[in-house]
Every structure is written in C-alpha cells, then in structure tokens.
Image: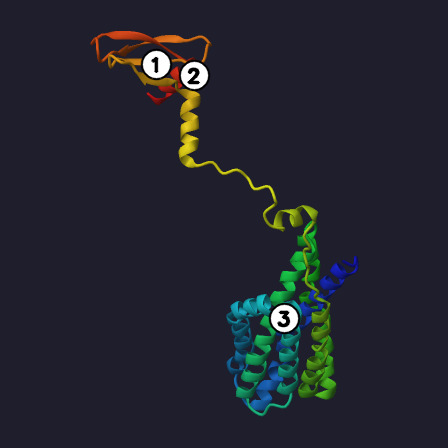
Amino acid sequence: MSTQLPQMVAVSFFVVEVFTYGFIKSFGIFLQDLMQEFGESNSRVSWIVSICVFVMCFTAPPASLLTRRFGFRPVVMAGGLFLSMGTITSGFTNTINQMYIRIGLFGGLGFSLIFLPTITILSQYFSQRRYLVISVASTGECFSIIILAPAFAALRDHIGWRSTLVVIGALQCIIVICGILLRPIIIRPGPAMLTETQGPSDKEPEVLNPKDSSNSKESMYTEDISDTTDGSCTQQSSCSEDKELIPCYSLSSGEFENIGLRPLHHQVLEDSR
C-alpha cells in the first residue's frame, strides 16, 4: 500500500465534509432570496434543510448495505452524482416543492451515500492516530462555514442565487474524484494462515472413542477387581507403590477385610465425597 494513500483518504474526507455538512449549514445564505423568489415563509423554506437531514439519516442503513454489497468507491461516486445533480437542478426550480425534492430528497440521499462510507474507510486506514486524523479531517465543515459561506454569499450578490447553486453543484462533482481515491484495504493471508486453511494434512489426528477414553481413565485411577471362587470381593493392585489399607465388606464371610488401594485412587474418592 502506498504511503501517500492514507493521507489522500484523509483529504478526501475533508472535501466531503466541506460539501456535505458544510453546505447544509451554509444554506442559510439563500434563505432571504428563496423567501422573496417563491413568496414563502421562513418556516416553509427551512423545510428544505430539514427534509435533507431527515433523508440523510433515514437512508443510512440502506447506504451501509450498499457499501457492503458494491464497495466504497461506487457508492461514494453515486452519492456525489446525486448530490451534484440535485444542487445544479435546484437552480432551475420554480416552486418550493421542487426544492424539497431536488435538494431535500436527492441531496439528502447523496449525503448519506457519501458520508458514511468515507468515515468508515478513514477509520480503517488509521489505527494508531485515528482520533487525531478524524478530528483534523472533520474541520472541513468549519472551513466551509468560515471561508466558503462568505465567498458564496459574495458570489450570490454578483451572479444571483440560481447561478451560485449551479456553481456549488459543479464543485460538488469533486466528490466523485474523492470516491476514486477510496481504495479498500485487502488483507492478504500470511504463510501461517495459508497453512491452516489448506485443508486437512496427510496425518490425521487420532480420535479416541469416548467409551475407550473413559475406560483408559478408569484403568489409570482404579485397580483391577475380580471375583474369587467363594464370591468374596477382592482387589488386585497393579502398582507396587505405597498403598493404604481400607476396609472392604466380603460377601462370603460377612466381615470386613483390609485391601490395598493406590493413593491416587484414595485422593479421587475423597474429592468425590
């Protein structure tokens, strides 16, 4: 991966912030012009931004699904086209309802398709200084409010609000270029991972039968028990280590007899009690 690519992704997110949230918060410079042009109240004109923000938040889950299905690049590029065309065509509207559709609906959908994939891939490119990078890149919104809003207001005074919206829509086409820079990160498996995923090896592991396993455990911790000819219960030790005598009831004589038992077995019996 190129060392300049993470920086380019951060710059792309900065540009996205300028023309998404920065544009929404700078839209107030057209408030008086739209009220005079369409003869609408302040609240009616303010619905343009309200619808735009609602559509942007409402379409966030579909935007996430589209990103998983098609990737970051096509989704961001499609969002840039939606946003740009919505802003450009809003300069040719004749009613406030058309502004609701073009900026509110198409612009809000474009915002959703642009912002979510960009912030997601930016967090993937940076792991150590992620919060610092996201904080610095998020200043694009402030840059738009402080620098571009007065510049667009001065441009509106010279060429009118309709032409200014067309110019802003043309500048928003830069987001399409930013989408091309969002190359996804591909994690390639290393040698150890390849060895694990190659499939079963020639030497298959031995699988113990649960019944055999239980028998082997009993043979480790117990001793061979056999019945004598007279029906008494006797026990033969398979180990010559130190034994401990415990009483055992004999069925033939009806008396208790001392038999040898391994210490380990005695420990297990005490734990089971």
Q: Is residue 57 above or below residue 185?
A: below
- Disc 1, SS: strand
Q: Nearer the viewer, residue 270 or 84?
A: 270
Q: Is residue 144 left or right of residue 200?
A: right
- Residue indicated by mark 2: 264
Point 67% across, 86% down: residue: 161
Q: Is residue 25 left or right of residue 248?
A: right
Residue 203: x percent and y percent? Answer: 60, 41
Nearest to viewer (mark 2 / mark 1): 1
Q: Is residue 257 above or below residue 208?
A: above
Q: CA distance from mark 2 to mark 1?
A: 15 Å
Q: Name the residue type under label 2.
A: Leu
Q: Name the residue type under label 1.
A: Gln
Q: Is residue 264 left or right of residue 180?
A: left
Residue 122: x percent and y percent? Answer: 67, 60
Q: Nearer the viewer, residue 241 or 127?
A: 241
Q: Nearer the viewer, residue 108 or 60?
A: 60
